[in-house]
Image (cartoon, coloured by chain):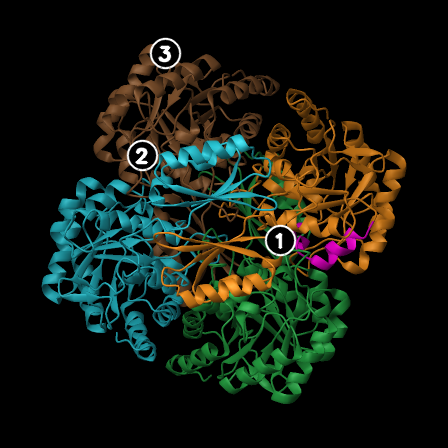
Chain colours: A brown, B cyan, C green, D orange
Amino acid sequence: MIIVLRPDATKKNIDHIIKKVKKLGLKPMVSKGVERTIIGLIGEEDILRVQPLEAFAGVEKVMPILKPYKLVSREFKGKNTIVDVDGIKVGGKRIVVMAGPCSVENLKALMGVGKSVSSSGALVLRGGAFKPRSSPYSFQGLGEEGLKYLKEVKAKTGLKIVTEVMDTRDVSLVEKYADILQVGARNMQNFNLLKEVGLSKKPVLLKRGISATIKELLMSAEYILANGNFNCMLCERGIRTFEDATRFTLDLNAVPLIKKLTHLPVIVDPSHGTGKWFLVSAMSRAAIAAGADGLIVEVHQSPEDAYSDGAQSLLPKKFDDMMKGLKPVAKAVGRDV
Amino acid sequence: MIIVLRPDATKKNIDHIIKKVKKLGLKPMVSKGVERTIIGLIGEEDILRVQPLEAFAGVEKVMPILKPYKLVSREFKGKNTIVDVDGIKVGGKRIVVMAGPCSVENLKALMGVGKSVSSSGALVLRGGAFKPRSSPYSFQGLGEEGLKYLKEVKAKTGLKIVTEVMDTRDVSLVEKYADILQVGARNMQNFNLLKEVGLSKKPVLLKRGISATIKELLMSAEYILANGNFNCMLCERGIRTFEDATRFTLDLNAVPLIKKLTHLPVIVDPSHGTGKWFLVSAMSRAAIAAGADGLIVEVHQSPEDAYSDGAQSLLPKKFDDMMKGLKPVAKAVGRDV
Amino acid sequence: MIIVLRPDATKKNIDHIIKKVKKLGLKPMVSKGVERTIIGLIGEEDILRVQPLEAFAGVEKVMPILKPYKLVSREFKGKNTIVDVDGIKVGGKRIVVMAGPCSVENLKALMGVGKSVSSSGALVLRGGAFKPRSSPYSFQGLGEEGLKYLKEVKAKTGLKIVTEVMDTRDVSLVEKYADILQVGARNMQNFNLLKEVGLSKKPVLLKRGISATIKELLMSAEYILANGNFNCMLCERGIRTFEDATRFTLDLNAVPLIKKLTHLPVIVDPSHGTGKWFLVSAMSRAAIAAGADGLIVEVHQSPEDAYSDGAQSLLPKKFDDMMKGLKPVAKAVGRDV
Amino acid sequence: MIIVLRPDATKKNIDHIIKKVKKLGLKPMVSKGVERTIIGLIGEEDILRVQPLEAFAGVEKVMPILKPYKLVSREFKGKNTIVDVDGIKVGGKRIVVMAGPCSVENLKALMGVGKSVSSSGALVLRGGAFKPRSSPYSFQGLGEEGLKYLKEVKAKTGLKIVTEVMDTRDVSLVEKYADILQVGARNMQNFNLLKEVGLSKKPVLLKRGISATIKELLMSAEYILANGNFNCMLCERGIRTFEDATRFTLDLNAVPLIKKLTHLPVIVDPSHGTGKWFLVSAMSRAAIAAGADGLIVEVHQSPEDAYSDGAQSLLPKKFDDMMKGLKPVAKAVGRDV
């Protein structure tokens, strides 16, 4: 931690800070520069995070040196984490594609989409039974009934299941059906929910909040790992910017950067990340070229009848074309799909 | 709802849309312009919200005409809502100031701050017993113990209590102690939590998410009202922008705009909205001049020892000075403080 | 300047950096912490700004200590700058209101607005003769003819003139007519234009770019002062955020913050900052309460016929009401209007 | 154009609007809905753009139907534009890589980089002679001397030259040396500069402003085409968001979207778009997979000595590796590099 003092900081201010810092068991090193005095602190920086040094008289700014996350960092674990999703490996050579409708609507439609995406090469079925909707008057999901449909499609197709859990009270229920517990973007900083899924044995897919920095995403993942669950995948799904021609701005910079900072697999959601079905294929190719370990894509048999997110859903035929187009790109970067 | 067709939309596309729309019980009006065909839809627009019209072949864009919120709108209720907080009226002539520490740390400190802010003119005590913290290693709050301390300070000072509830499982507990249930910025779209506080009889203070539009804030309030709780106050507390000289950008445009769109009271949080204690007084004055119905301000007896948010907390003495400075501004806009 | 090394930085990396830094005439101070080595550099930090230290092997990040601006800073000049605009003082006790149409359209209309705003208490007339328009097919301004009209209104009313200059080639022309040279938001980083107005003797009103940080605004002002023109006023006019209910987000945090960091006067533009005429009065009051030294407001005799920005223009009558409402607020913060 | 009226709009308001609109030669179509009256306008929408309909009494909002750009749109020209850069075709099957230092510093270094990037497969040399720098105290470029060095390297290597022009007064000078006139991000809305390069015969590379929407970028390109220069390339170079782990957020959504909306070639700048040299290769691959027609990449022989942007520059060896890695990705999407 570096404390930069104001040019008008008095000796009394400085002595007061030094005294406080020493009390905390840290060793201050004072450098008097031409224009500023700076105090470097040696010792466990975490002690200082809880201390609001900027509130001290005479302090201009405080600059942390170390990253606030530990267990998720590459420094903690150099090797890539491979998450085992009921036998499917995420984070290895094979790029794992998750596909399916935004919401589970009925068994027949889900089975149709499931069979179709499975035959196109998807390994995991997505579908929401609990739906976060900005309007109280929108379809809120089928709940446990939807989870049961997912399980039936799994039984028929072998697809693994990823589905969202929104409420701490539902974790034990969703766990019974899902192979991956999805924490949605709106809940990325629902810390109690993070703790609950951290206590689960099921893998977690943690989506980045629409205005969360990469550092905050990693801090939220840290909650999951710190509670004992190391089977955590991170998902870039678009951030909110001023651009309104797309629903969100898919931040692919995040892919190679997260891979550098952490050992966890990275999944990209081009459906939410663009909000436009006609951009999904191009951005899926880009995600793989950037180094993503997987994709999560919305597919619906009749987007014009979808209960949610129709504008960003692919028809099964378009998804099949997309999968074919991904193969050479994956190969070009040394991966399979 | 207006449907704008692509220049290359075929007659078949148009007929297909018209057929679908009629099936929904709506009356389409087709205007063939020089460059585009447009279909206006008359009837209940809400029917169309669930229908992803953008997914239809030939459609370029769909433009809603009506606002998606109802109960919170000025059109639903023209007169200002006055929220009764255990006898204190929020939304009337008197500007209500809520003040106190970010976190409840111990009884003695809380009592000290409570007595002090009360004598300076605050009517409500703020203080977090459940704390959303971005790091799992930060202080997470005292839980029920903290709620008890708040109640003790209320007993001594007469201050009402506003405190955050973060988890659907805690609503019934927090309700027992709080006069106002605060839903924090990170939970503005935790819809299950919104439903729970909507079912409560206690007033709610709903904070705007750091990247939530005003429309989304109003939709979240709609969840609370739609579940039966009309005692809802909205809180502007700063949005996330590219500017990094302040912690957030306090969006005071939101104050007169929300007052225009809705009948609910608006509270401003200049402490989080700036992140710098030395900006709090100026922005409090500005908030009142812009038409806010109240303020929520962080005050700590020793910011340099605070467990959280020390950099944005005022000393009791500075808070007292601030309160004195607010009086003439409130008077200038026809209010009291 | 503080250089934080990566945990895997080798001794060779460190020695290489130290050698380079010494060559530049700086004194490095190495602190070996438990997890990281840090090199503090003492001496003229500006030498280091030109050196891309992050490109060195082994470096994780580089943190500057000092502010990159000098002449505009409070440290350079403690006392507020009072800018003399042909006899009107900006930055003193009196709040200076600038008002008029977005574009100069014709003499008659301009004269009408000029007389009206003058009688309401405005001291400066705004009006664009050179207009930056996002479409090449929009009205681009009257050019020199517009400048002449401004001068005629000045002759009749005594109002001083603020008008935009967009092109380095036009500075000498605009100077002949204007009392204040306005550099628009889109040109805040048109550095050649900044140099030219820096060489002028006329006061400058520098508007903040819609995505410029406060630091960047101050750096742009530094260009003007560094070229010799200390009569510089800064203008907050709204920043671009995700919020789309208003045209821009007026960042009033900027007002007290800029006043703290610099000695230059701060003007607020609530017309562009909100984009909605019905928010202008409330935000003008807020700006003054926050400490602004002046306002620049769009007024048009018939907003529905305006060539530009009609939706954010006030009618003269509404402007007059607004001015009356500003008086008590100004008084409440120890100012006049 | 669709005019949505307020629920409280009077018959007088409506009649007034209809009268005005008819006077403009447009045909209004009034639909009285259950909750709102809507007026659709048929005729040349451009007439209405100059009319501030939102300023009319009774109007709630105005929604344009047509895109404000014409010449740059796919509707105007269906086939991709191929820009001829002194014999090199941009926009065809071959992906064109432009590479070189941020600033031209001296002939020897430039020649070294030029030879190196040429042998790695770059076809165009980048290098700034006029440099927009946020600080007046930073290196501002060599001016014409720098342009001469670029020409010498062209003579030796055959590389074409792209270099920035910042000032309307410099266009005729830069034209003499450059094969592509670059308009930088900060000047994307310097409309006078756009007009000047629009009058030039040399191809233009127009960079997206850091907070410009795609629509605004296309409107700026429209300025260039409307002045007669159809040889315009668009460049995505990162937008400003809240994320601070990267210098900017490279918006690759823009690539397929711009290709859909317009016939102009799209170039991606991963150096500025990330600000980190270690992200450049991955994002270059992603850009090509997303459909970019070219790349512009910073390469410096000794990034640690660069006068600008060292942290985002590749060493020639790393650039060579990157080029090798691009080949299979280009092939995977049916292109060459």
User: In the rendering, which numbered label is found on residue D283?
Assistant: none
Disc 2 is placed on an element classified as loop
The residue sitting at 64% across, 57% down in the picture is D134
Q: Nearer the viewer, residue A83 or C19?
A: A83
Q: Report x, y in % for residue B305.
A: 30, 57
The subunit carrying tag 1 is D
Q: Report x, y in % for residue A286.
A: 57, 29
Q: Quadrant of residue A322?
A: top right
| Relative to C10, residue A47 above or below | below
Residue where numbered disc 3 is placed:
A158
Q: Nearer the viewer, residue A46 or D162?
A: D162
The subunit carrying tag 2 is A
Q: Nearer the viewer, residue C8 or D150?
A: D150
Amino acid of disc 1: Glu
Q: CA distance from mark 3 to mark 1?
A: 57 Å
Q: Report x, y in % for residue C243.
A: 45, 53
Q: Main secondary structure of the magenta part?
A: helix
Mark 2 or 3, closer to the camera: 2
How many numbered circles does the render carry?
A: 3
From this viewpoint, is residue D239 visible? yes
From this viewpoint, is residue A237 visible? no
Residue B33 lies in the magenta-colored region: no
Relative placement, left or right, of C216 versus B170 is right
Q: CA distance from mark 2 to mark 3?
A: 24 Å
Mark 3 or 1, closer to the camera: 1
The residue sitting at 46% across, 34% down in the picture is B17
Residue where numbered disc 1 is placed:
D44
Q: Quadrant of residue D280?
A: top right
Q: Pointer 2: residues within 10 angstroms few (<14), some, or many (20+)?
A: many
**What span is colored magenta in the figure?**
D184-200
Residue where numbered disc 2 is placed:
A131
Q: Quadrant of residue D331?
A: top right
